Structures are given as structure tokens and as C-alpha cells.
């Protein structure tokens, strides 16, 4: 290998073929117990250990007979996360996990604790990944540097939440919210994501309230339309980042396939059908999308809709010279939206010292300097964005 070139992670040629228990429907578990010639009530016991106590191995299900524990380990993976490294930040309020899967791929999840304040109860929010890498390629996102690896299975998605549930229940707490805002585009992996969200909100499984689950998308219209047809109580979040087509083409390349006007129309249909307000996520990038004209465009786009805008200062990531907007520019942007009648919240970044933005820890594994492919992509983004960025205040 040439000197200074980052190593490539080795992926297992024959990953574990056993299905993850978290992705097994309760009815199928009942059928498996019956076909394995165990009493029917054992299915309920297994579910209690798996979903109630968040067991990571069959051996932890200590009240089950040894023969059943052996059969479980033979036919299922109780936990699909092969290995996990955790980094704490914010005096323990934020923790980020780097999970290694059976085939060696890396995904990330984040736990964010919010202490009780005023009338608001204590919360513990988990941000989870739906893909290893991402194909959308937003140039300000560390996950985009990794490219697309593969979709995650239902169990690999749910087991990220169960990992954090084990940690918080040890402190006498519980997970209160789950957001699909980690690595990957959730609605490009729609079947497993919908099944995972269903498992997380099923009272017989994880049991989280449906209104406490948020599905994020950069604008995959067929996925939004599918959610609308399902009429769930989940929150839909749209990664906006720009309200003009030319700039959004650069910041969210998927805009070329699913134009912004059509995305907002589909999201508005979701809000109308479900009665759930749509969140629009807007990463604030200094000198790129944070001008008064940008704010006015967002206001014009969303005025009168059942919508809410979250302004998020960009997390500095490797391989880009872009930086977060100043606090003053973020505040001015928010003021313009409020004057337009659009509800807005300014989010504070969590865990910056541990690279808590999606993909940052996994990107570190690729090494530095940046791969040649990343440099070429940056050059292309700058060329394509020149017209959109020129002449901006």
C-alpha cells in the first residue's frame, strides 16, 4: 500500500446469515417456538427478555431452559451489533456510538440526554442510522464522504436503539424519542425503516409512542407518498437546507431527481392527511445559505403550511472548508422566518468535541489525507455551485 494512503476496512466474505431477533415479527416468533417443540408461553418469555430487558445474548435470558437458549443462538442473532465503541461529551449528556456490523461495516448512533426544564420532562433521544454510508452525497455531510455501503436490516436499525436502552435503563431511565437522522437516507431503505419504526412503536415490542418517532428524508417523494398512505403518527422531517432550486441542487443533489416544489407538496399532503406538523431541517452554512434572501425564500416556501423549521449550525466536517454560520446570522435568519409567520427553532449542536455529526467517526476510519475521490467530488461541487454562490451577500 502506498505511503500515506488510508487503509480500506476488510469486510467479512461470509457475514452471519442468522436473522436478527429484533426483525422477527411476534407471530413468526410464536411459529418458531412451536416448530422447535417448546411450549407456546416461551415466545412471550423470549419477547420479555428481548424487548423488556434488552438482552444482548441468549445467555442473559437466564430463566429459559438451556436447550431453548442454545436453539435461539443457533437460529437467531439476539444482537446484530458485533462491536461498539462509545465516546461521551457534554459532561455525559451526549454519547456517540460507533457500531461494527457482522460484515465489518461501521454505522453510528447518538444518545442525547435532556434534563427536565420547567414543564418539560426529562428526555433521552436516540439518533439512529438506516444505511451504512449514503448515496445522496450532500457536500456538507461527513457520511457523504463515505459513499454508499449497503442498506441496514430491520434488526440492525432497531438494535441501535436497544443498545442505548440498555445503558439508560441501568440508570433507571428510558428512551423517550427516536429520530432516523443518522447515516443514510431512510426512505431509500423504506421497507426496513418502516418495519423498524413499527417495531419500535409496537406496544408488544419496544413500545415507544408513535409521536416520539421522527423519520427524516432529503426528499424521496415515493417514500413520503408511501408514508402518507400508511397514515402513521410519526413525525416527518425534510432536510431542506436551501429554498431555491439551484442552490439546493448543490447542497442536496437528490433535488435534481425530486425537485423542491414537489417535495414540499408531498410533505404538505402528509401533514394534511396525518395532522402532523412537518419539520424542515436547515443546516446553516456561513456565506452559503444563510443570507436574508435565503431566509425570505424559506419563508415564502413554507408560509401558511403545517410546518416548523429547525435551524442547525453546520457541524465542521473533514474535507470541506465550509463553516457554521455565526450566532448573529442564525438569529437574523430566524427573525425573518418569524416575521413571515413560519415557526422556527434554533438548535444547539451537541457533542462537537467527539464529532457527533453523522458519519464523522466512521469517516475517521478512512484516514487522512482525504482520498482522491473526495478531492474530485469537492472540485465538482465547487464548479457546479459557482453560479449559485456567486454574488451572494
Image (cartoon, helix red, strand yellow):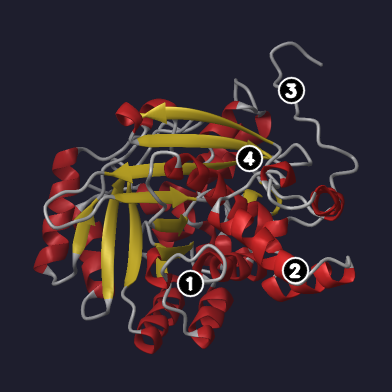
Q: Is residue 12 left or right of residue 325?
A: right
Which residue position is annotated with label 3?
Answer: 7
Instruction: Give the mark, 3 or 2, whose residue is nearer the N terminus.
Output: 3
Mark 4: few/some/many CA within 10 Å (<14, 14-19, 20+): many
- Mark 3 burial class by Cα count in 10 Å: few <14, some 14-19, many 20+: few
Quickly name the residue at label 1.
Answer: 259
Q: Are marks 2 and 1 in contact (CB under 8 Å)?
A: no
Cα–Cα span, label 2 and label 1: 43 Å
Please give the label number shown on residue 137: none
Chain-order first, disc 4 or disc 2: 2
Q: Quadrant of the N terminus?
A: top right
Which structural element holds mark 2?
helix
Q: What residue do we see at 82% from left, 68% from top? A: 32
Nearest to viewer (mark 4 / mark 1): 4
Asked which quadrant contains residue 348, the reply is top left
Label located before the other in sequence (2 or 1):
2
Which one is nearer the viewer's eye here, 380 or 119?
Answer: 119
Q: Is residue 193 above or below residue 352?
A: below
Helix, strand or loop status at disc 3: loop
- The residue that disc 4 covers is 146
Task: Left or right? Give the position of 69 relative to 4.
Answer: right
Nearer-N-terminus badge (3/4):
3
Q: Position of residue 270 (x, y in %)?
A: 42, 82
Residue occupied by mark 2: 29
Amino acid at each position: 500500500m502506498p505511503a500515506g494512503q488510508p487503509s480500506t476496512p476488510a469486510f467479512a466474505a461470509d457475514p452471519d446469515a442468522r436473522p436478527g431477533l429484533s426483525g422477527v415479527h411476534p407471530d413468526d416468533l410464536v411459529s418458531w417456538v412451536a416448530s422447535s417443540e417448546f411450549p407456546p408461553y416461551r415466545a412471550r418469555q423470549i419477547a420479555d427478555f428481548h424487548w423488556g430487558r434488552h438482552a444482548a445474548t441468549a445467555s442473559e435470558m437466564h430463566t429459559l431452559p438451556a436447550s431453548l437458549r442454545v436453539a435461539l443462538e443457533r437460529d437467531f442473532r439476539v444482537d446484530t451489533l458485533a462491536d461498539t465503541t462509545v465516546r461521551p461529551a457534554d459532561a455525559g449528556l451526549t454519547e456517540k456510538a460507533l457500531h461494527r456490523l457482522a460484515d465489518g461495516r461501521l454505522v453510528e448512533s447518538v444518545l442525547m440526554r435532556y434534563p427536565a426544564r420547567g414543564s418539560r420532562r426529562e428526555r433521552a433521544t436516540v439518533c439512529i442510522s438506516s444505511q451504512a454510508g449514503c448515496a445522496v452525497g450532500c457536500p456538507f455531510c461527513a457520511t457523504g464522504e463515505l459513499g454508499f455501503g449497503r442498506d441496514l436490516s430491520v434488526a440492525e436499525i432497531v438494535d441501535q436503539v436497544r443498545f442505548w436502552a440498555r445503558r439508560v435503563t441501568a440508570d433507571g431511565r428510558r428512551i423517550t424519542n427516536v429520530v432516523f437522522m443518522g447515516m443514510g437516507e431512510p426512505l431509500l431503505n423504506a421497507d426496513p425503516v418502516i418495519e423498524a419504526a413499527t417495531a419500535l412503536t409496537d406496544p408488544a415490542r419496544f413500545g415507544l409512542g408513535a409521536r416520539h418517532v421522527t423519520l427524516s428524508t432529503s426528499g424521496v417523494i415515493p417514500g413520503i407518498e408511501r408514508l402518507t398512505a400508511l397514515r402513521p403518527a410519526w413525525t416527518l422531517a425534510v432536510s431542506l437546507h436551501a429554498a431555491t432550486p439551484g442552490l439546493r441542487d448543490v447542497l442536496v443533489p437528490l433535488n435534481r431527481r425530486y425537485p423542491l416544489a414537489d417535495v414540499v407538496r408531498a410533505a404538505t399532503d402528509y401533514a394534511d392527511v396525518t395532522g402532523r406538523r412537518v419539520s424542515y431541517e436547515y443546516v446553516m452554512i456561513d456565506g452559503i445559505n444563510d443570507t436574508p434572501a435565503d431566509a425570505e425564500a424559506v419563508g415564502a416556501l413554507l408560509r401558511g403550511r403545517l410546518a416548523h423549521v429547525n435551524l442547525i449550525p453546520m457541524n465542521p466536517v473533514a474535507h470541506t472548508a465550509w463553516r457554521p454560520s455565526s450566532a448573529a446570522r442564525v438569529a437574523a435568519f430566524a427573525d425573518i422566518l418569524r416575521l413571515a409567520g413560519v415557526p422556527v427553532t434554533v438548535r444547539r449542536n451537541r457533542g462537537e468535541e467527539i464529532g457527533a455529526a453523522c458519519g464523522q467517526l466512521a469517516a475517521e476510519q478512512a484516514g487522512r489525507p482525504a482520498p482522491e475521490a473526495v478531492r474530485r467530488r469537492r472540485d465538482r461541487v465547487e464548479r457546479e455551485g459557482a453560479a449559485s454562490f456567486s454574488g451572494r451577500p
